[in-house]
Image (cartoon, rainbow, N blue to C red):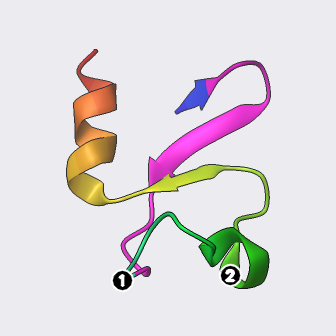
């Protein structure tokens, strides 16, 4: 789901944790990764 131009938000079911320092070693390639339940909430807004 695109927002703020070319930035996207999507579920990342392959991850078991989010937030904290994860972006330093297991970051995304530009998208915001979210748990499935949270991504679904944004789709309904």
If you read the primary sequence from the N terminus, does the residue marked by circle 1 or circle 2 appear first?
Answer: 1
Relative horizontal placement of residue 5, taking residue 9 as reference (left or right): right
Q: Is residue 21 above or below residue 19?
A: below
Quadrant assignment for the C terminus: top left
Counting other residues with Cα less than 10 Å from the Cα at mark 1, is it few (<14), some (14-19), or many (20 or more)?
A: few
Mark drawn on residue 8: none
Up-down relation of residue 27 to residue 36 (above or below): below
Q: What residue sits 70% from the left and 19% below the top? A: 4
Q: Residue at x 33, y 59 (%)?
A: 35
Point out residue 25 in the picture as x, y percentages from the top left corner: 74, 84
Number of disc labels: 2
The residues bearing labels 1 and 2 have C-alpha atoms spaced at a distance of 11 Å
Numbered disc 1: secondary structure: loop
Residue 29 image point, x, y percent = 78, 62
Quarter of the image holding residue 12?
bottom left
User: As displayed, is residue 6 above or below residue 20?
Assistant: above
Q: Which residue is mark 2?
A: 26
Please provide the residue range marked out in magenta: 3-15
Please indicate whether residue 34 sits to the left or right of residue 24 in the image.
Answer: left
Disc on res. 16: 1
Q: Which residue shows up at 27% across the image and 45% down it?
A: 38
Q: Secondary structure at mark 2?
A: helix
Which image quadrant for residue 15?
A: bottom left
């Amino acid at each position: 789901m695109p927002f703020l131009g070319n930035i996207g938000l999507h579920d990342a079911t392959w991850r078991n944790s989010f937030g904290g320092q994860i972006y330093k070693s297991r970051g995304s390639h530009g998208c915001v990764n979210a748990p499935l339940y949270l991504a679904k909430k944004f789709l309904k807004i």
